Image (cartoon, coloured by chain):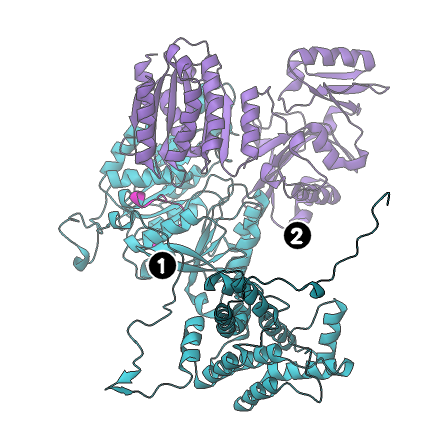
């Protein structure tokens, strides 16, 4: 599937094992701050934590709890305590590993604390394809061979896709990871043992309840379901199908200047059943009813499916629409459709008949019309 | 010859992994509508079944199934050129490796799973990416119109095959990272009155085995291809491969691209879209940056999808080529005429490929007013040819005739006959009474022939020592089938066994019979009554006869035991015996049978409480 970020706590635990002295704290558990001075931070995949005030350095119990309470008010629930590692700025380096087509690519700078995007000339790139490459990379980068060997072993064994250590502190033979970010290959979850799990995945932002429910649905079927809520009070609600087709349709809205009206992005694909499609459609439709926008439109659209059955997926969508048809009518919602694929004729006929009967019909297009037809109609009907 | 040329010459044999009947059926429909005489699907790797039924045109066919690549018979192997892997991401890696290890000369394949770990994908690239054309992980496969449909590409119902003109070869190559958009573009090419030369859905995963560059090289070197249409998305840097090829002039054919993902600009943060790769990690991975780079290098990369379609209509293309004989007035554009209406409403039947009785060969018993001379053992021969599906030799027919005659009846004491008679006397009809008798047939009565056949096959296959074999069986507490008799014993041989044993002399080799006799030597040392019985000798000799006279292999004999064939040799004649008992009971008409009191042992009741 995709690369997903895991918590810093889990990342370091995997990298360092027993040696790692960090403490994980979660809001719904009882929080006990161990004695001593700590670095405390939010551990939910948030970028630029220092700038956002989501890190405190060298504090003790009560001060840390105070900081955590303030972070909780911002919606965070997962935190990390780490011992302070005193070091000189000159000892800081940047180090990252990423899986690429040929093997693993290393990026390394001997100077730390710099923005690597701003200083590409200071970044050295090495590509590891087989064990024989380690000696050469070690010689050219100055990083100990043993460190590289361990890093590669851990990276592969735990199905990492990306690992960034910034800064990496090198004090002679001793190496400290002050900050580590790991993206794991989510397809590896089945294969890893005593490593990370679904539980360790962090989002970088608070998740909408509908998104969580769709993720749970996706986990229990070979079909694919995705949902991101962009603007709860948006006017254009998307019930799209197909990973590529859905972007083409959303693009059209943006190109027509209606980007800010989009309430959600998402897609279903991979041949879901009627029941699964019903559950998914229900989430989108519920979001739509909750939106405070004045004029709302539902766009049920996708490309010409290869194997997803148009009839049975449309039956699922109709099931979900049926439950709230009066409310949709009252809100003045119109539904715009474009779809092709197996059982297209029957599926479109059912949908048209239903929408006409319930007075929800915007327009219905089949595979003879262009993929952007429905979104075009919807925008035309609700001028920006 | 490159891969596409070989496909167009007929190298189209597909081995399917996993169960996805709709996709397999769509391939067979494509084959049929493309005018192929033979389906391209050679077999399916799926456990627990020996074959799966599909339609080829209007008729049903059986596609053989195998447990693993190793089980594919030799005669099918040369046909296999392509792998269609429909297994889940958890299993697809292993089976892909197994396929290309077994078929190193194969042209390529498609991996359907969307969730194969990256590390496994890069491993496949390193091992097989150079030599083979492999679409995926993820996506919908490879299409060469009129020649190969490897996957769901182009759709799975036949209306889609027609609408996308998948049976007609053309000159526009369709390449896409998205499976759904592959089909959308194929339809758009058809709508623009052009036809597709070939199409590859590269897949939206991060590491497709065959890269975009490899596919574009294929298009550049393909004589049939005049232009390329490409669908890509935000995320990843594949499109810079096109830019590089255009700049170095390794790609000179016109390229028309649509790069989706302008919508990402509407959000505060970069978003993960549907495909694994669809996330902008660097500035140059945005849809806009890629469009601009492509335009600068000389590709067409329109701003909107409707513009993209208008450009598509302007692309150069060759007239559709088809042999003159295949043209008709209806297909003026050169399209193959595809009659999909005839394929709708296909009815699935219960599979029966066997013509039990040859309707053209009605046996003539009377010729010219006289009784004609008949074949020897005619009924046994006809029954065997029905059971086995082919004519048998005289020795086989004679042996079975001998068994039939021996086994018609064994008196009224045996349990099957008792049940038949009891049922008849209860006033039931012939079929009910016969059924009561037949339902008695099982491991303790009459059903041991098949078990004995399995046992002798097993012993010979292992080349087992008889003593060890007996030891191993009895240790497990298993009974030996085909051994032991209530009445006959060493010194008082079973005359029926002696009669049947004569057939061994008609054979050059009789390993199963020899093994059975060796086992008998071991068991009779324990008890004189543990002799080879009729079930045992029947099974052993029939195995030897089928092997020598009918050319059955050990595997084919194994299949016969799995289908319980050997028990038929008891059931057929004994049916006659049961009916005989039924008729006799009807004629005697003694009324309802009740077990005489003295035959029923009744447990004495204990004293009641309080007495």
State the residue in front, B359 or B19: B359
Q: Which chain is purple?
A: A
Q: Which residues are magenta?
A: B148-160
Residue B495 visible from this viewpoint: yes
State the residue in front, A373 or B476: B476
**Residue B422's quadrant in the figure?**
bottom right
- Where is A22 relative to B368, above or below? above
Residue at the outermost left position: B329
* Both marks 2 and 1 on one chain: no
Residue at the outermost bottom position: B505
A82 horizontally vs B299: left or right: right
Q: Position of residue B330 (x, y in %)?
A: 15, 48
Residue under circle 2? A132
State the residue in front, B577 or A342: B577
The chain containing the residue under callout 2 comes to A
Q: Which mark is residue B39?
A: 1
């Amino acid at each position: 599937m995709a690369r997903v970020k895991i918590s810093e706590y889990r990342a370091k635990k995997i990298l360092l094992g027993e040696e790692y002295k960090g403490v994980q704290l979660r809001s719904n558990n009882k929080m006990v701050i161990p004695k001593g001075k700590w670095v405390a931070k939010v551990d939910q995949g948030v970028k630029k934590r220092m700038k956002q005030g989501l890190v405190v350095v060298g504090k003790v119990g009560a001060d840390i709890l105070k900081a955590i309470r303030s972070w909780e008010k911002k919606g965070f629930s997962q935190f990390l305590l780490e011992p302070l590692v005193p070091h000189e700025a000159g000892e800081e380096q940047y180090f990252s590993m990423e899986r690429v087509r040929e093997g693993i690519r290393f990026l390394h700078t001997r100077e730390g604390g710099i923005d690597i995007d701003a200083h590409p000339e200071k970044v050295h790139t090495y590509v590891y394809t087989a064990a024989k490459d380690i000696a050469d990379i070690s010689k050219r980068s100055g990083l100990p061979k043993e460190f590289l060997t361990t890093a590669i072993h851990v990276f592969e064994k735990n199905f990492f896709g990306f690992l960034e250590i910034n800064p990496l502190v090198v004090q002679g033979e001793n190496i400290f990871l002050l900050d580590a970010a790991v993206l794991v290959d989510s397809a590896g979850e089945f294969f890893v043992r005593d490593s990370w799990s679904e539980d360790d995945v962090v989002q970088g932002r608070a998740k909408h309840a509908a998104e969580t429910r769709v993720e749970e649905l996706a986990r229990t079927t070979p079909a694919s379901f995705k949902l991101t809520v962009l603007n709860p009070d948006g006017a254009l609600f998307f019930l799209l199908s197909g990973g590529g087709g859905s972007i083409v349709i959303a693009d059209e809205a943006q190109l027509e200047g209606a980007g800010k009206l989009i309430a959600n992005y998402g897609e279903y694909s991979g041949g879901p059943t009627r029941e699964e499609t019903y559950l998914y459609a229900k989430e989108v439709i519920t979001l739509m009813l909750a939106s405070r926008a004045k004029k709302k439109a539902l766009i049920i659209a996708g490309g010409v499916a290869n194997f997803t059955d148009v009839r049975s997926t449309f039956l699922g969508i109709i099931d979900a629409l049926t439950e709230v048809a009066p409310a949709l009518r009252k809100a003045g919602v119109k539904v715009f459709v474009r779809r092709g694929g197996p059982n297209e004729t029957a599926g479109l006929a059912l949908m048209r008949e239903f929408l006409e009967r319930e007075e929800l019909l915007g327009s219905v297009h089949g595979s003879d019309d262009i993929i952007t037809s429905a979104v075009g109609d919807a925008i035309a009907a609700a001028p920006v | 010859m490159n891969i596409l040329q070989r496909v167009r010459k007929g190298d189209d044999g597909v081995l399917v992994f996993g169960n996805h009947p709709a996709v397999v059926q769509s391939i067979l429909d494509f084959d049929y509508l493309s005018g192929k005489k033979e389906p391209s699907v050679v077999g399916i790797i799926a456990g627990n079944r020996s074959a799966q039924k599909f339609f080829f045109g209007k008729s049903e066919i059986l596609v053989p199934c195998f447990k693993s690549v190793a089980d594919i018979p030799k005669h099918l192997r040369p046909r296999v050129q392509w792998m269609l892997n429909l297994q889940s991401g958890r299993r697809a890696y292993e089976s892909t490796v197994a396929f290309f290890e077994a078929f190193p000369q194969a042209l390529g394949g498609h991996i359907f799973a969307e969730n194969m770990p990256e590390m496994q994908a890069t491993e496949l690239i390193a091992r097989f990416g150079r030599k083979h054309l492999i679409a995926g992980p993820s996506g919908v496969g490879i299409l060469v119109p009129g020649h190969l449909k490897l996957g769901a590409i182009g759709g799975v119902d036949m209306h889609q095959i027609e609408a996308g003109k998948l049976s007609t070869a053309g000159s526009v190559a369709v390449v896409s990272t998205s499976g759904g958009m592959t089909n959308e573009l194929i339809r758009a090419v058809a709508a623009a009155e052009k036809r597709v030369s070939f199409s590859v859905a590269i897949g939206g995963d991060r590491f497709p085995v065959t890269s975009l560059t490899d596919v574009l090289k294929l298009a550049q070197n393909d004589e049939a291809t005049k232009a390329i249409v490409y669908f890509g998305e935000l995320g990843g840097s594949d499109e810079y491969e096109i830019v590089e090829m255009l700049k170095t002039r390794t790609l000179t054919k016109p390229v028309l691209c649509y790069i989706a993902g302008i919508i990402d600009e509407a959000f505060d943060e970069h978003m993960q879209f549907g495909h694994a790769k669809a996330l902008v990690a660097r500035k140059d991975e945005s849809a806009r940056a890629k469009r601009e780079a492509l335009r600068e290098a000389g590709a067409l990369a329109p701003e909107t999808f409707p513009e993209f379609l208008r450009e598509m209509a302007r692309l150069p293309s060759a007239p559709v080529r088809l042999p003159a004989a295949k043209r008709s007035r209806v297909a003026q554009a050169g399209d193959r005429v595809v009659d999909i209406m005839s394929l709708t409403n296909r009815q699935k039947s219960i599979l029966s490929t066997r013509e039990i009785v040859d309707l053209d060969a009605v046996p003539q018993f009377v010729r010219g007013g006289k009784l004609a001379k008949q074949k020897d053992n005619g009924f046994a021969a006809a029954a065997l040819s029905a059971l086995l599906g082919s004519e048998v030799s005289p020795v086989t027919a004679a042996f079975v005739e001998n068994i039939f005659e021996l086994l018609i009846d064994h008196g009224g004491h045996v349990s099957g006959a008792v049940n038949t008679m009891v049922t008849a006397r209860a006033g039931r009809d012939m079929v009910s009474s016969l059924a009561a008798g037949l339902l008695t047939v099982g491991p303790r009565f009459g059903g041991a022939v098949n078990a004995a056949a399995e046992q002798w096959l097993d012993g010979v296959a292992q080349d087992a020592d008889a003593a060890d074999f007996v030891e191993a069986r009895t240790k497990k507490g298993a009974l030996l089938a085909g051994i032991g008799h209530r009445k006959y014993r060493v010194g008082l041989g079973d005359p029926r066994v002696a009669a049947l044993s004569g057939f061994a002399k008609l054979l050059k080799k009789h390993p199963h019979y020899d093994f059975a006799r060796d086992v008998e030597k071991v068991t009779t040392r324990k008890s004189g009554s543990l002799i080879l019985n009729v079930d045992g000798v029947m099974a052993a000799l029939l195995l030897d006869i089928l092997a020598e006279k009918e050319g059955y292999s050990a595997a084919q004999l194994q299949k016969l035991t799995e289908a319980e064939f050997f028990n038929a040799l008891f059931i057929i004649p004994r049916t006659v015996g049961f009916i005989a008992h039924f008729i006799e009971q009807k004629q005697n008409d003694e009324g309802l049978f009740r077990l005489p009191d003295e035959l029923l042992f009744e447990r004495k009741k204990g004293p009641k409480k309080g007495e």
